[in-house]
Image (spheres, rainbow, N blue to C red):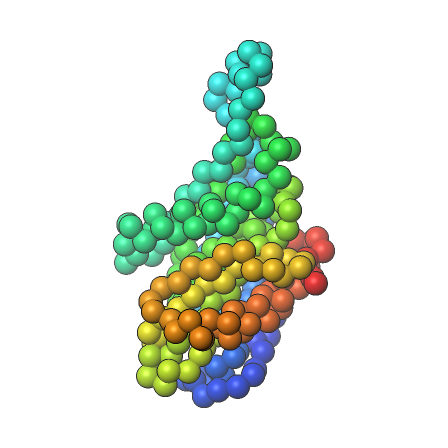
Amino acid sequence: ALSAMSERVVGGRKRQREDGALRPPEYTMGLVSEADGSARFGLGATVVTAAVRGPRLSKGSALDALSGVSGAFTLDVHFRGPATMRQNETGRWKTFLADVLRPLILAERYPRSCLTLSLHCSHDDGAMLAAAVNAAAAALVDAGVELRGIPVACQAGVDRDRKSLLLDPQRSTDPTSAEATFVFVAPEMHPVAVHQSGPIDPASLPELESMAQQACVSIANLARHAVGVETSA
């Protein structure tokens, strides 16, 4: 497993972690023996495991090939969160993850094929969606899936009481009024998606995105060592 120390910036949140500090991220590769690729990403007590099966030829693809039909690549995402997670929220997260990952997969290399991505959050102490993106990306690389870039994610939010901006809010100690998960693609670190929960002042979004992007550079550098590919800017 590879982990990194948290970075201290500014602030005054609980447990001596400052407003711009990231909990130590950690990657562990190849945990699911029956999968073609797998990875676990931890951020403090938040832990998500991802397993990839495929790409494999879809059902009927052999007949399609014989008949000259060009079948499309498909990505099937499964997400299992804590028991307290609402079903409609699970559905939104599955859609978000598929929308982030599908454009980054070199689908033209896998015609008439299906790839299944299964994610399980064993514990959620904040930033579960960001952890899911990071675990999924590492598992795809572990499975040898060719990507246009490596997605890296981090969450930032607004402190409910102090109204200050927080990097990587911790569910157990950092009550927030709103949160946003930002996804960037390494090595260029350009933004590709954001998932927002709760109302955020539009004027605060650029600063939240900047906080998340800086943290994602550190996560991407750790990912580079974990998965064995160049992801740093």
- For the point 49% across and 62% down, the residue is 182
| Residue 66 visible in the picture | yes
Q: Is residue 24 visible?
A: no
Residue sitting at the far bottom: 12
Q: Residue at x 58, y 78 (%)?
A: 7
Residue 101 in picture, x, y percent from top left: 52, 47
Depth order, front residue of 206/106: 206
The image shows residue 111, relative to residue 157, as above or below, that is above
Which quadrant is the C terminus positioned in?
Answer: bottom right
**Relative to 90, 129 lies left or right:** right
Q: Is the residue 14 above or below the residue 23 in the image?
A: below
Quadrant where the N terminus is found in the figure: bottom right
Q: As displayed, is residue 222 above or below residue 80? A: below
Q: Give the residue displayed 48% in from the left and 87% down from the top.
A: 11
Q: Residue at x 52, y 59 (%)?
A: 183
Residue 192 lies left or right of residue 169; in this view the side is right
